[in-house]
Image (cartoon, rainbow, N blue to C red):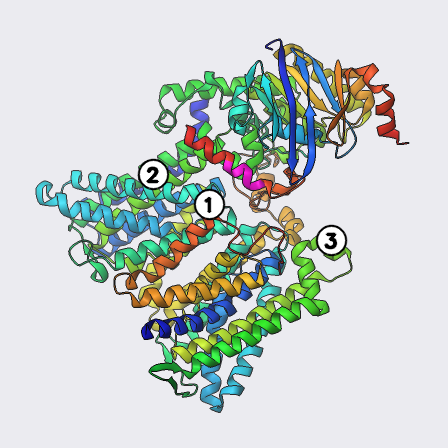
Amino acid sequence: MSLKNKSLKYYYSTIIVAAFGLLSVILSMTIGLEKSTIYLLEKIVIAVILAVSLNLVVGFLGELSLGHAGFMCVGAYLGGKFAVIISSSLGNSALTLILSMLVGGTVAALCGILIGLPALRLKGDYLAIVTLGFGEIVKSIFQNTSRESFGGALGLETPRYNKDELFIYAFAVLIITLLVVQNLMNSKHGRAITSIRDNEIAARATGINVTKYKLMAFIISSFFAGVAGVLYSFSNYNIQSSKFGYNYSIEILVMVVLGGIGSINGSIIAATLITFINTEFATILTGNLAVLQNLLYAIILIVIVIYGNSPALSAFREKYDIKKLFDKFKKRDPSIIKEDKANWNNIPTKIPMDELLSVDVSNNDQNLDSDETDKGGK
Amino acid sequence: MADYVLETKNLGITFGGLKAAQDVNIKISKNQIYGLVGPNGAGKTTIFNMLTGVYTPTSGTFFLNGEELKGKSQETINHKGIARTFQNIRLFNNMSVIRNVLVGLSNQPEFKCGLFTSIFRLPKHFRTEKAMRDKAKELLKIFDLYEERNNLSCNLPYGKQRKLEIARALATNPKLLLLDEPAAGMNPNETADLMDTIRLIRDKFDITVLLIEHDMKFVSGLCDEITVLNFGTVLAQGDTKTALNDPEVIKAYIGG
Amino acid sequence: MQQFCEQLLNGLNLGSVYALIALGYTMVYGIAKMLNFAHGDIIMVGGYTIYVFMNMTGHPLIAVAVAVVFCVLLGITIEKVAYKPLRGASPLAVLITAIGVSYLLQSLAQIVFGSAPKMVKIADMGVLKIGSLKIQNYTLLTLACSIVVMIALTLFVKFTKIGRAMLATSEDKAATQLMGINVNNVITVTFAIGSALAALAGLFYLLKAPSISNTFGSMPGIKAFTAAVIGGIGSIPGAMLGGILLGIVECISYKIPAIAAYTDAIEFLILIVILLVKPTGILGKRRSEKV
């Protein structure tokens, strides 16, 4: 059972989050927390769920999605509407919350299939654009719904929960998300997903069902985005589709990139920090100065990606890698790896198809077609 | 028909008018080590690509132990029992050595473990994980990679990367193993070592090997039978020595 | 019928603006093999430059000239600072950097000009009447300019040395380098041309709707990218065709009450469908003329 002990280290972050959640619950019950603090905690929890779930697609599957807010939007609206309907009979109970989160998550997951299917044909830039388009379509559809159905431009009102209760549920959902993602990534299924990211051709040749695992990653990722959307709708009482635009997707992406692509712990830390700073900045900086934080994110994003991926800087990175310095300090062999982190520098995001199809690239299409017929047969 | 592990019947493929391979008939018996030789561009890798489902043959078909596999997807063909390595090594570079092998093991029936079993960490998950790790370690020991099991696979020296690729292919429990230029870029010592390894895995795993190689010493020392290709067609076939001494073959190689 | 003709003209007008922007995307994609997400925001910078210099000089030609020069310089700077270090890195890394640059330009513009839209009055051009058909003069100007620019660009690519170097680079970067062509220069020129076209697109947008904010360029940018993909990314005629098609679809859909509100959604849906059915776009062939 040494395996169990060894895998315990994957859960450190979950345990810390759980401990933090427990502490805030105890605090809110004994001395009571301010409404704004609880709201901030909820916002952080939602951001962490979003970042971790996006990391599943961007970091572990290696595909860029620019429509994560779109999945969240679908979840928020459908789950919120469902809650409005059933709360008349079930009241504002935990059951209402759980059921509506399941509904929101499931519908978002269905959209994940919708977007995951093109992902089988499209790579990199194209997929990014399709997901972006999806996000905008979703936004536009909900914006133009009637007042009775989803509230249209005025937004959808959701049941008002007691804030003290809601953030306990939020923490519970976060812990479940972390457990599911950690357990998934540290299993044979997770290994299959990362193998597609590392080398899709080799993954196919090794018998990995690429279709199945790509869809799996998309579905799980969008499910949790949908759940986060439902939490968001309860936390804010009112949802506006304009909130879920392209900018929000980018904000989540910044969290993932800042925290380290393919690192769950990094996503947790980055999402917490960014949400915290965002909220605190909003009270200090007003008017045009509030944009300073966007400027800061933009610069952080550019600097981190160039630093992490520039071929010219690779020697510099080797020399001043923080992890390696840390290993040296602890007298650990730096060549031994502990965590499977993505490094886009090594990932062939565009498969050199012509390398494999040495004669004519047009045969590429024929290959895709044969894949399609296979899918139908299963 | 089932006497042969692999049998191709008039296998051929054209790319927009260019016949990359045509009328290739190969019969490989069980536990043979079979060679595919020929000058650059003769269509050797193209045949590998057809046998593994990367290309769908435009003419002819092929059978593995009597079962037709033409038109099947790459995954399916792998599950049926054909595994391969690549001419330019394709490892999962961002993974540790052992993880590379674990990915190869994941489709075997004995390590079946559903998504929910893994997510809810049911006892079966731990059992299969443990069994997979043991199996992977066993494989790595055979290839002398056990000590490096936690290293990043792209940091291995070239020869060991080739070995790891073979180990990963073997992890999928193939009946037929396709090796695309396994000795490329190796020094004579490593090549000799590799020959022993290939014989060893043939016996230990009870498999059949089909390999592409340019090193004639390697081919004549290892292969029971060969097929010589040139411009996509079969030039000579049969017992290694006789085929290599065929005047047509000598002409194709030396020119003249 | 009359309304249809008017919308068709509006569509051509909008479409030629999309085409101008799409040309920038398509050329950069063909040569640098990257999706320049910040391209739309160059339009915005061009628009603001026109706004500033209109207020300073009151002369439209000067304002436009300054805007073109400024955008060209900006485009080159962005390429040198943000994209050049990533040459040879993964396309996803480049894409994320481009998103960062886009964000940066938008935030900078908001800090400098505020978030409230600014009105830009460039010139009052009047209306041309043919029978009962009313044609805005700016529509004609836009169309004329766009056609001239596109012809000039096609000739430039076909008959000048640097243009042919661009074609060669889009075919095979490594081989072009071996032929002694400085690929870095080619990429710089491509970014310069794309940015100049974006500045012009900014002008035509302002003629149509004289109000500008910091997100002025993002929607047209995304739409124009859609147009480039529809036409077949990497192909110059494809970008023109895609732009005009998209413009006409947008204007007509805008006038049909039942679907007017979903115009954006429809355009993205077209994009998704085209990518699924024919990922190479209408005119994009694997071995077609690429720039």
Query: Is disc 2 surrounded by few (<14), some (14 to 19) or many (20+) residues within 10 Å?
Result: many
> Where, by quadrant of the figure, is residue B8 drawn?
top right
Does residue A368 show up magenta in the picture?
yes
| Magenta highlight range | A364-369
Outermost residue toward the right?
A: B256
Query: Against A121, is C149 above or below?
Result: below
* Disc 2: host chain: A
Quadrant, the C terminus of chain B? top right
Q: Is residue A99 left or right of residue A120?
A: left
Give how far apart the Cα atoms at labels 3 and 1 are: 33 Å
Residue C175 disc label = 3
Check if mark 1 and mark 2 are on a common chain. yes
**Residue linked to disc 1:** A58
Badge 2 amino acid? Thr
* Disc 3: host chain: C
Ranked by sequence position, the earlier of labels 1 and 2 is: 1
**Residue linked to disc 2:** A177
Query: Is disc 3 surrounded by few (<14), some (14 to 19) or many (20+) residues within 10 Å?
Result: few
Give how far apart the Cα atoms at labels 2 and 3 are: 49 Å
Check if mark 3 and mark 1 are on a common chain. no
Quadrant, the N terminus of chain B? top right
Residue at 75% over, 15% down: B225
Label 1: element kind: helix
Residue A100 location (% of width, % of height): 21, 42
* Disc 1: host chain: A
Label 2: element kind: helix
